[in-house]
Amino acid sequence: QVQLAESGGGLVQPGGSLRLSCRTSGIIFSTYNMGWYRQAPGKDREWVASIASGGRRTEYTDSVKGRFTISRVDRSNTAYLQMNTLRPEDTAVYYCSANLPHTDKYVWGQGTQVTVAS
């Protein structure tokens, strides 16, 4: 059974940092592209960052460039999102996704809440 489990969300003040984790099971993790998405209240889910299988290519949406870093550790089947200099507009539920390259097959986690507020 394929499972993605996010953790690491919480309440943080503006300017603070959080590190999200996405632990996977049931997939050959090293062969999957991994991504992070977020959904703020009343808004559509948006893509935040991706890291390709092998980890050599990363991409970010413009609003998080220079503040967020996506990474992966294949031996532990886990992807990460390091979030620094957080802003109130980063408040959202953050979702991890796993995508088999060259397919439209996506697997999603349940999400973890990130709230940035004073």
Image (cartoon, rainbow, N blue to C red):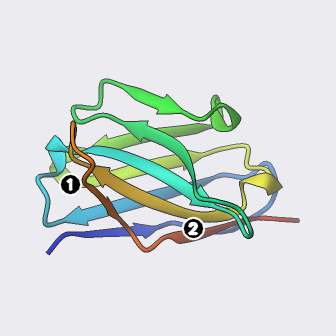
Residue 114 in the figure: left or right of residue 73: right
Residue type at mark 2? Answer: Gly
Q: Secondary structure at mark 1?
A: helix
Q: Quadrant of the C terminus?
A: bottom right
Above-or-below relation of 24 to 63? below
Residue 8 in the figure: left or right of residue 42: left
Disc 1 crowd rating (10 Å Cα; few below 14, some 14-19, many 20+) is: few
Which quadrant would residue 51 be assigned to in this image? top left
- Residue 57 location in percent, x, y? 35, 25
Residue at (52, 53) in percent of width and height: 37
Residue at (45, 69) in percent of width and height: 7
Q: Quadrant of the N terminus?
A: bottom left
Residue 109 in the figure: left or right of residue 78: right
Q: Find the residue positioned furthest to the top.
A: 56
State which tag comes first along the sequence, 1 or 2: 2
Residue type at mark 1? Answer: Ser
Which quadrant would residue 71 be assigned to in this image? top left
Q: Which residue is mark 2?
A: 9
Q: Which residue is mark 1?
A: 76
Residue at (33, 46) in percent of width and height: 34
- Residue 31 location in percent, x, y? 15, 42
Q: CA distance from mark 1 to mark 2?
A: 20 Å
Above-or-below relation of 89 to 111? above
